Image: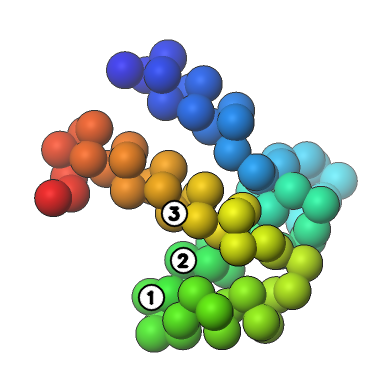
């Protein structure tokens, strides 16, 4: 399962580069940390509002990260 998850991570629209936000995972083509999506959603901000606040992040990028998180938790038995 670890190999599958590693392959899926490689296909995500994220970038980890020590020259960009000190290596924090960011959405491809942006300087927006992936954590910003989760932090905003957990604070009650809607996906639409997040995308409006971070226009360099596409809906497709955000949905791909959310789908990966959901699918990974299900594979690990941590989500229903």
Vertical order, 43 against 67 (above or below): below
* Left or right: residue 40 compared with residue 73: right
Spatial CA span between label 3 and label 1: 12 Å
Disc ID at residue 66: 3
Is residue 40 something one can see in this rendering? no
Dot 1 falls on a residue whose secondary structure is helix
C-beta proximity under 8 Å, tags 2 and 1: yes
Disc ID at residue 72: none
Spatial CA span between label 2 and label 1: 6 Å
The residue positioned 66% from the left and 44% from the top of the image is 14
**Classed neighbour count for the residue bearing mark 1: other residues with Cα under 10 Å, few (<14), some (14–19), many (≥20):** few
Residue under circle 2? 38
Q: How many marks?
A: 3
* Left or right: residue 33 compared with residue 3: right
Residue under circle 1? 42
Vertical order, 36 against 17 (above or below): below
The residue positioned 32% from the left and 48% from the top of the image is 70
**Quadrant housing the N terminus:** top left
Determine the residue located farthest toward the front in the rendered image.
Answer: 60
Residue 72 image position (x, y, % from top left):
33, 38
C-beta proximity under 8 Å, tags 3 and 2: no
Q: Please name the colour scheme applied to the rendered image.
A: rainbow
Sequence-wise, the earlier of marks 3 and 2 is 2
**Classed neighbour count for the residue bearing mark 2: other residues with Cα under 10 Å, few (<14), some (14–19), many (≥20):** some
Residue 30 image position (x, y, % from top left):
79, 58
Is residue 52 something one can see in this rendering? yes
The residue positioned 63% from the left and 75% from the top of the image is 51
Dot 2 falls on a residue whose secondary structure is helix
Residue 69 image position (x, y, % from top left):
39, 47
């Amino acid at each position: 399962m670890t190999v599958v998850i590693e392959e899926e991570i490689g296909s995500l629209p994220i970038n980890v580069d020590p020259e960009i936000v000190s290596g924090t995972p960011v959405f491809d083509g942006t300087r927006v940390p992936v954590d910003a999506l989760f932090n905003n959603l957990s604070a009650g901000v809607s996906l639409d509002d997040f995308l409006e606040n971070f226009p360099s992040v596409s809906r497709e990028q955000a949905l791909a990260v959310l789908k990966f998180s959901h699918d990974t938790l299900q594979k690990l038995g941590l989500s229903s």
